[in-house]
Amino acid sequence: MAENSRIAGFRNMSVNDRRSAVAEATGLDDGAFAQIDATAFGPEQAANLSENVFGVFSLPLGTATNFTINGTDVLVPMATEEASVIAAASNAARMARPQGGFSTSSTQPIMQAQIQLINVADPHAARSRILEHQDEVIDLANAQDPKLVEVGGGVKGLDVRLVEAKSATYVVVHLHVDVRDAMGANAVNTMAEAVSGSLAAIAQGDALLRILTNKADLRLSRARAVFDKEMLGGSEVVDNILHAYELAAADPYRAATHNKGIMNGISAVVLATGNDTRAVEAGAHSHAQADGRYTSLSTFEKDAEGNLVGNLEMPMPVGLVGGATKVHPAARTALRIAEVSTAKDLAEIIVATGLAQNLAALRVLATEGVQRGHMSLHAKNLAVSAGATAEEATAIVERLIAEKSFRFDRVQALLAELRSGARTPDAQGTGAQSSGGQK
């Protein structure tokens, strides 16, 4: 793992200096960073991952600093276009360091395949018949992937559910598959296809759907951290963060945005490492549905000393083998930066990042509001969009922050004034501050 995830002045370094700092912290050679340049993954390579390819779409790839996870420092690779995400995660991780950083744990990497059986005359009896034959069904499924079984994975059990639908009672069989270091979709889908005929015969019906479920509630990862109350801003800030969390726990309208803030961090690491963002997001939001109500994925409370304690538990179906994790050169480099050796390691880093992101967003909302930090970073994007050079963008951003005005028309006006050599007017009368989305 990284010798020290605290890299002084990292955000102010040039791109080349950041690469050198990451290489020094992780032991990577310079050749690893050549793999993340745009030319390393062109349309020809991309055509192996998708269809009708005519180009490659790039996103910024950065690293969050300051993370200590289970006593070890980690640099966290993140791919995101949204300003403030990586900075916020790094800042929250810094606040967790005095109390030991993040502690994580996981269940076994169990993915589930569903086989839907239709036209079953006696669903209850069919369920019993399937359970009577479960050993032979499991053996048939495991025969599809002997290598997985050899390394300790494979089907570990099955369930049979009766699902009451509008037109029928469906018999739905779940295979519980330990997929080891894979995300597992291909493995469980192959097994579902292989056993569907036998299950249909046992149930005396017909097999229809044979596919995994992305509600990966048997494959959970957890992260816990204590955030220092003084670094957060004191007891009042801690109390306000708790009020913000409690609204998310009670109100699905707030919970949707609260959980989106978690996913800002989660999806950025999932994407950077070549994993399936849609699968992780589907699992996360289905997990947030508790007792028929959509609620917060995370919990927050105070410890005996008044520090803020955060917990996050959620499905995390990610892998190190298969798909883009092996094909995409930037994903391979990201995994080397994270220095993970198992899918469990990666899953726990991802969940710790989600918790950090969540805390950072809550702290901003409970203190200065989202606009000051988020929109200050967004101001640079506005300036570049208007055609400003790096030097011009710096001057424009300073003015926008001073004026608390983050409108594109104001950026255009300031750029025109800079280029004409005219003295810019005072900040008064520059218009109302724009509204930005909460995190």
Image: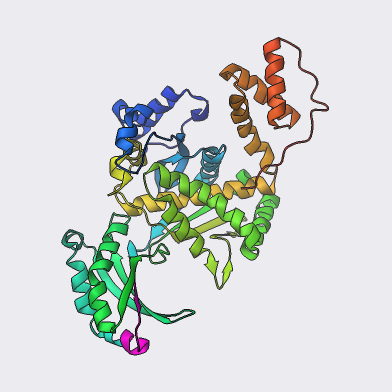
Residue 121 forms part of the magenta stretch: yes
Name above or below for residue 375 compared with residue 277. Answer: above
Q: Position of residue 57 (x, y in %)?
A: 43, 35
Query: Visible in this render: residue 424?
Result: yes
Judged left or right of residue 319, residue 376 is: right
Judged left or right of residue 115, residue 8 is: right
Q: Which segment is the magenta one?
A: 112-127
| Camera-nearest residue between 244 and 46 | 46
Name above or below for residue 216 compared with residue 202. Answer: above
| Camera-nearest residue between 264 and 102 | 264
Q: Residue at x 45, y 25 (%)?
A: 15
Q: Position of residue 236 (x, y in %)?
A: 71, 51
Q: Position of residue 328 (x, y in %)?
A: 32, 39
| Camera-nearest residue between 200 and 8 | 200
**Quadrant including the N terminus:** top left
Count of numbered circles in the view? 0
Q: Residue at x 51, y 60 (%)?
A: 285
Query: Visible in this render: residue 35?
Result: no
- Give the residue at the far top of this rendering: 421
Residue 247 forms part of the magenta stretch: no
Q: Residue at x 43, y 37 (%)?
A: 5
Q: Position of residue 396 (x, y in %)?
A: 66, 22
Residue 400, located in which quarter of the rendered image? top right
Q: Residue at x 70, y 32 (%)?
A: 407
